[in-house]
Amino acid sequence: MPSPFPGMNPYLEHPDRWQTVHNRLIVALADYLTPLLLPKYQVDIDKRVYQVVGLNTLLVGRPDVTVPMTLPMPEEVREAYLEVKDAATRQVVTAIEILSPANKHGEGRQKYEEKRQKVLQSQTHLVEIDLLVRGKPLPILTGAVASDYRILVSRSPDRPIADLYPFNLPEPIPPFPLPLQDKTEEPTVDLQSLLHQVYDRSGYDYFIDYTEDVVLPFSKTTLLWIEEYLHQKGLRT
């Protein structure tokens, strides 16, 4: 069964679910693009591994003896992303990122911004997909629009100009073009359909309790919409 929400499902952002959602969506996107791009392009799933401090913390101390303190703990972060490569030269044509919480906070954000800047200074196109409400959006110099979610499509010849696709929770995820080399027709990515497939194949309909409130920094209007929408869908009484 597909997700009950018309666009992004805010319950998928739960810390216990997001990493699995992220990884499955990466695979679904690769499987979707591969037959569209063959034989000229190859779609690879790559992974970066790094350590950050502060994603999780450790509470230490003994009652009645010391004052409990929270210590920042180093944590290994593994993030999958996609690279569309020229099949003949193996040159990376397009980098596709689906942001994780670590990309939007603290040390992990700094590391991601450094990687992002390298791509923006290269001949590689960038597609950056942000389906997370938590965390400050990645920097955009001009034309930024306040929204719950956003997709950035940056074509290397057009920089610093890029295309931004902002959208909010009640709205479907907008389709976007995948930039490729010159004279190659750009396929349109229907990320909404892929997210519904991931939701269905993962069986989230059986595991998500929609009677629980969403604990995310939405506006009061959006939180009210969520409550009313779930009532309409019969997922709350």
Image (cartoon, helix red, strand yellow):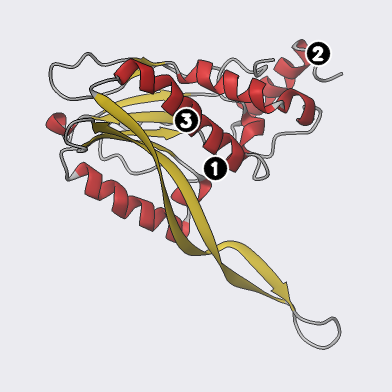
Q: Is residue 154 visible?
A: yes
Q: Is residue 149 left or right of residue 237?
A: left
Residue 126 quadrant:
top left
| Residue at the bottom extreme, as displayed | 65
- Name the kind of residue labelled 1 in the image: Arg
Q: Is residue 59 left or right of residue 84?
A: right
Measure how far apart labels 2 and 3 are at the Cα level: 26 Å
SS class, disc 2: loop
**Circle 1 sits on which residue?**
134
- From the image, tell me which residue sits under label 3: 149
Crowding around mark 2 (Cα neighbors within 10 Å: few <14, some 14 to 19, many 20+) is few
The C terminus is located in which quarter? top right
User: Residue at label 2?
Assistant: 234
- Judged from the image, the secondary structure of the residue bearing numbered disc 3 is strand
Q: Are marks 2 and 3 in contact (CB under 8 Å)?
A: no
Residue drawn 47% across the image and 33% down it? 26
Q: Residues within 10 Å of mark 3 (few under 14, many from 20)?
A: many
Q: Is residue 169 left or right of residue 50?
A: right
Amino acid type assigned to the residue bearing label 3 in the image: Tyr
User: What's the residue at 52%, 15% (across, down)?
Assistant: 193
Helix, strand or loop at label 1? It is loop
Label 2 – label 1 distance at C-alpha: 27 Å
Image location of residue 62, percent across then percent down: 81, 82
